[in-house]
Image: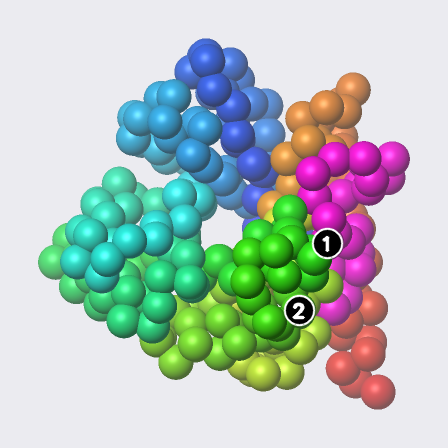
């Protein structure tokens, strides 16, 4: 296995109700994934304490709260995210360029003040639960792919580390924003999990990595399997194969 494969896998710790159960997932998977995603459900249920508990166990956190508000509010939230010690957090690109610039500036100044490494700041482009028809219903003239690329360009101009985008948009975003721009892809499906839920623009781990994704968020395919650590390892093996195919293609 490529030694870089495991750090690219992020487990979606989207659970509520019982903090002990959430931490059981962390203990079970911390040696099999590179990071844990704490989203709205877990953060609302358990508060910021879940982040310190994960970090205390030697694991990294992606804070997935999709900050989307006026620039001053997002600036404060970004500073708070850095103070929590997360390795990555996101904002919503639809909040606009000024809002994104404030997020980056606040994160950087807070990291410098605390003498800690600045977390990656990503912008959410188009949710993977939305397709072209959904966007038309919302009044957008662009397709999901077109809007994702447009928002990615704006995020890069604002100084963000990268974006959260569907694996189906990785290739055009990479072309528009360059090789040093991070692309994190949710909506990753595995085997029989590839269909039948609320995600509409999805790909397999191998396809996403081969297309150029940097990080993959996987939740239900791991959490609903009979052997979650084994499934995480299998996904890492597929990520490794995707990296090999991507390297092979780049050398042609």
Q: Residue at x 38, y 21 (%)?
A: 45
Left or right of 76: which side holds 104?
Answer: right
Q: Position of residue 38 (x, y in %)?
A: 45, 36
Q: Which residue is mark 2?
A: 143
Residue numbers of the magenta segment: 189-213
Report whether residue 104 is seen.
Answer: no
Left or right of 143: which side holds 77?
Answer: left
Q: Position of residue 218 (x, y in %)?
A: 65, 41
Q: Quadrant of residue 99?
A: bottom left
Q: Position of residue 124 (x, y in %)?
A: 48, 58
Q: Which mark is residue 165?
A: none
| Mark 2 residue element | loop
Q: Residue at x 27, y 71 (%)?
A: 98
Q: Residue at x 42, y 68 (%)?
A: 161
Vertical relation: 132 (above or below) 180: above
Extreme residue in the bottom direction: 252
Of residue 27 and residue 166, the one placed in the foreground of this image is 166
| Mark 1 residue element | loop
Q: Which residue is mark 1?
A: 201
Q: Position of residue 209 (x, y in %)?
A: 72, 61
């Amino acid at each position: 296995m490529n030694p870089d494969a495991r750090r690219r896998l992020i487990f979606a710790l989207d659970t509520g109700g019982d903090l002990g159960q959430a931490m059981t997932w962390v203990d079970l998977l911390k040696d099999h994934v590179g990071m844990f995603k704490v989203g709205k459900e877990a953060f609302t249920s358990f508060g910021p304490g879940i982040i310190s508990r994960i970090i205390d166990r030697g694991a990294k956190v992606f804070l997935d709260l999709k900050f989307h508000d006026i620039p001053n509010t997002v600036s404060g939230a970004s500073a708070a995210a850095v103070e929590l010690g997360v390795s990555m957090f996101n904002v919503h690109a639809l909040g606009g360029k000024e809002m994104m610039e404030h997020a980056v500036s606040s994160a950087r100044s807070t990291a410098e003040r605390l003498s800690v490494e600045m977390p990656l700041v990503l912008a959410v482009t188009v949710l993977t639960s939305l397709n072209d028809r959904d966007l038309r219903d919302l009044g957008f003239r662009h397709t999901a792919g077109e809007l994702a690329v447009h928002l990615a360009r704006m995020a890069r101009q604002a100084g963000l580390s990268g974006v959260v985008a569907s694996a189906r948009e990785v290739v055009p975003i990479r072309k528009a924003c360059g090789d040093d721009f991070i692309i994190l892809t949710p909506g990753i499906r595995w085997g029989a999990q590839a269909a039948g839920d609320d995600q509409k623009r999805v790909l397999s781990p191998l396809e996403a990595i081969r297309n150029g994704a940097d990080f993959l968020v996987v939740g239900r395919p791991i959490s609903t399997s009979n052997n979650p650590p084994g499934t995480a390892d299998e996904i890492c093996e597929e990520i490794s194969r995707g990296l090999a195919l991507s390297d092979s293609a780049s050398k042609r």
